[in-house]
Amino acid sequence: MIDFHAHILPDTDDGAVDIIQTRKMLEEARMAGFTDIIATSHYKKEVFELNEISRQNRINIIEKIDNKVKLHIGSEIYITRDLVNLIKDKKASSINNTRYVLFELPFRDNLLIFNSVIDDLKRNKLIPILAHPERYEIVKNNPKIVEDWIKRGIYMQANYLSILDKYGKDARKTLEILLKHNLIHFLGSDAHRPDNTYPKIAEATEKIKKIIGEDNFYKLSEENPRKVLNNEKIEFLKTTEIKQSIFNKFK
Ligand SMILES: [Fe+2]
């Protein structure tokens, strides 16, 4: 399995604080069945701004002392008007320096710049992947918006532990809807610390497999992430339309 989303680099963002925590997380990830982790440290202007060279140096150091799980460079980029420039300037990183870019949204605010940022990415032949759609208010209130985003060429990465209510009941129900309708393309741990995430991946995996089956679970946890690492094209899964009534009854 490839962990598509993790804050595992030491002293980089709000994830692992030091190399001791990083190594503990690596061991837990290995026990959970991960062979690879994409180190998607936050990149948020004026908050987390460690550039690519500094992050790659951390990966190189870790690899020398602990190489049982392979780390790949990436970023979880907080949406901003000049997102493309952050990548071109090697401040933030695309996933493994491919065309694929993981980005996140504010959890509550309106998304005034969303459309222009997506258009800008596409003009520059970059492929957007949205981190944990199930956690945003705009999606919890209307999961059908994800259908529109996918039609615009945006891929979706869900968090394993959303299915265990880590982010609340609404996020879990939203993820169930998205999974049932084949609207998720990657799974990630979004781990920030030892102890509280990787040890629960097995339990989350069982629940997710019950919803999407073994074959699709393999796609989301291994096949699609591997294609991203190799900069290959990913087919969108055949989706079924979300009926309005499915989510209205939760409200
Ligand atoms: Fe994250």
Image (cartoon, rainbow, N blue to C red):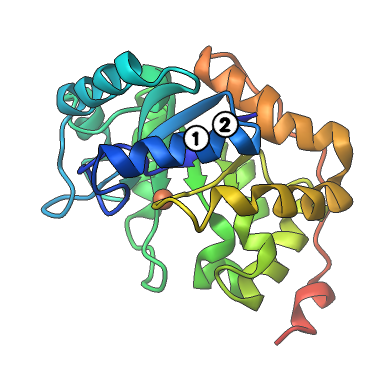
Classify residue 248 as left or right of residue 88.
right
The residue that mark 1 highlights is: 27
Disc 2 residue type? Answer: Arg
Task: State yes or no: discs 1 and 2 in contact (Cβ < 8 Å).
Answer: yes
Residue at 85%, 53% (x, y): give it: 211
Kindly tell me whether mark 2's CB lies below 8 Å from ligand 1: no
- Dot 1: element: helix
Disc 1 residue type? Answer: Glu
Mark 1 neighbour density, 10 Å: few (under 14) some (14–19) many (20 or more): some
> Count the marks: how many?
2
Residue at 51%, 73% (x, y): give it: 137
**175 or 61, which is in the foreground?**
61
On-image quarter of the N terminus: top right
Q: Where, by quadrant of the figure, is residue 247 drawn?
A: bottom right
Residue at 88%, 42% (x, y): give it: 213
Using the rendered image of the protein, determine whether residue 159 is visible from the camera's viewpoint: no
Q: Position of residue 167 (x, y in %)?
A: 55, 69
Classify residue 119 as left or right of residue 129.
left
The CA span between labels 1 and 2 is 5 Å
Badge number at residue 114: none
Classify residue 140 as left or right of residue 243.
left
Q: Position of residue 47 (x, y in %)?
A: 15, 54
Residue at 32%, 19% (x, y): give it: 65
Q: Where, by quadrant of the figure, is residue 109 drawn?
A: bottom left
The residue that mark 2 highlights is: 30
